[in-house]
Amino acid sequence: MAEDQEEQSAEPEGQPAAELPPSSRENRLALIRAIQEARDSHVIAYCAGDRQGAMGQIGEDAVRPMYDHVRALGFNGVPRIDLFLYSRGGSIEAPWRIVSMLREYCQELNVLIPYRAHSAATLIALGADHIVMGKKGELGPIDPIMSKFERGERTVIQEDMSVEDIMSFVSFLKERVGIDDSAALASSMNILAEKLSPWLLGSIYRAHSHIRFIARKLLACQQKPLDEQRLALIVASLAEKTYFHGHDIARSEAKEMGLPIVEPDEELESKLWQLFEAYEALLKLQFPIDPRTVVPSGQDEYVEQVILACIESEAQLSVFRGDLRLRYVRQMPANLNLNLNLNVQLPPGMRPERLPEAARVAIQQMFQQLEAQIATLVQIQVQRQAPIQGTEGGLFNAFWQEATNEGI
C-alpha cells in the first residue's frame, strides 16, 4: 500500500508537487490511507453535517450505501475496521443496524472521533471496542429528543424536548419542592398532562426504556464484556446523570464513565483533524445558509444543491445530496381586487360596429389577454413590495448517490 501511494504521488523531477484542494477526493484518500497505515486498519468515514440551514443526521437510509463500502472489504471481512465519525445525532434505531453490520465484517471495531459524535453517534461509539478521541473529541447524552404538540384543534410543533426534561420535572417535585404526598403529586402531574398529549407521555415512557435497551445492547457488542456495575454506570451517566442534552462529554469525562477511550499520538491526531477539515469543507459546515442573506436582492427564492452527509472509503464515495429551496413568505393585502379598464382610442374615422365580426372578436380577445397579463404583472409587483412575513423551504430530490468519480 505504501509503495502504491508513493507511485501515485510521484512528480517529474524539477516540477513542484501539485497542491490538492482540501476537500478533494485525492486529498481525503491520502489521509485515509495514512490513518489506515498508522493503525493497520480499514477506514470508513461517516459524516452527517450540521451546517446551519442544511442539517444532516444519522439515518437508517445510510445503512444501504454503507453496506456497499463494507462489501468492498471482501466476503471474509478484515481484522480491524475504524469508523471515522462526525454527527450531532439522528435516529436511535440506526446505530444498532450500523454497528451490527460492521461487526459482521471485522474482528475488531473502533470509532475515530476528532470532534463531534453526539447523541446517536455516541450510541454508535458504545458498540466499538475502542473509542479513539482527539483532544477536541466530544460525545453527548443519549436521551432522545421528542417534539411537543399543542393540544386542541391546532397540531403545531412548538418546540423540542428531551425525555429527561419530563423525568427531571418529576424529580424536581419530589426532591426540591418536597412533594411526597401521592395526591399532591398526582395533582401536579395533571398540570403536566394538560400541557402534553397522552400520545407524547406514552412515547416518553417507551423512549425512556428503549434508549437504555439500545445502549446496553451496543455495549454488549464489545470484545471485552463489561460487568453489570460498569455497564449500568455508563448507561446512567449518558441517559440520566447528564442533565442537559447539549452537554459535551470530553474524553476525560468519558474515561471516568468507564468507556474504552484511546488517546491518539500527535501524528495520528493531526491526520484525524485534517480529515475532519476536509469533510468540513466538503459539507460547507462553515458557510451557514441564512434566508435573510442568501436570497438574492430583488428575488424571493434561493436554490442551492447541498450535500448533507457522506460515506467514504478507499473503494468509493457516497453522498446524500439534494436541492435546498428557500423562499420569502410575504403578507399580501387582504381582499386585493384589481379592476382594470383599458380605454383604447381607435384611429379617427374607425367605428367598431363597422368592423367585420371576426375582427371585433379578435380585438376583444386581445384586450382580455392584455388585461390578464397586466393584472398578473401588477400582482407580482404588489407581492414584491409586500412586507416579508417569514421564510419557508425544504429539501427536494434528496437521496444517497454514488459520487466517486465526480471530482469532489
Image (tube, helix red, strand yellow):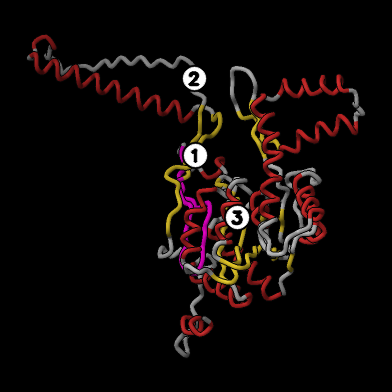
Q: CA distance from mark 2 to mark 3?
A: 39 Å
Q: Is residue 312 magenta?
A: yes
From what the image shows, is residue 406 above or below residue 48? below
Kindly identify which numbered label has been placed on residue 333. Answer: 2
The mark nearer the N terminus, 3 or 1, is: 3
- As rendered, which of 400 and 339 lies closer to the eye? 400
Looking at the image, which residue is at 70% across and 34% down?
A: 205
- As rendered, which of 197 and 100 lies closer to the eye? 100
- Residue 8: x and y, percent? 46, 81
Looking at the image, which residue is at 73% across and 61% down?
A: 225
- Residue 212: x and y, percent? 71, 45
Q: Name the residue at the bottom extreme.
A: 13
Callout 1 crowding tier (Cα within 10 Å): few <14, some 14–19, many ≥20: few
Circle 3 — which element?
loop
Picture quarter containing residue 105? bottom right
- Residue 371: x and y, percent? 29, 20
Residue kind at label 3, given as amino acid type? Gln
The mark nearer the N terminus, 2 or 3, is: 3
**Residue of label 3:** 286
Looking at the rendered image, the disc whose residue lies closer to the viewer, 3 or 1, is: 1
Looking at the image, which residue is at 63% across and 71% down?
A: 271
State the extent of the magenta-drawn residues as a range: 301-323
From what the image shows, is residue 332 above or below residue 84? above
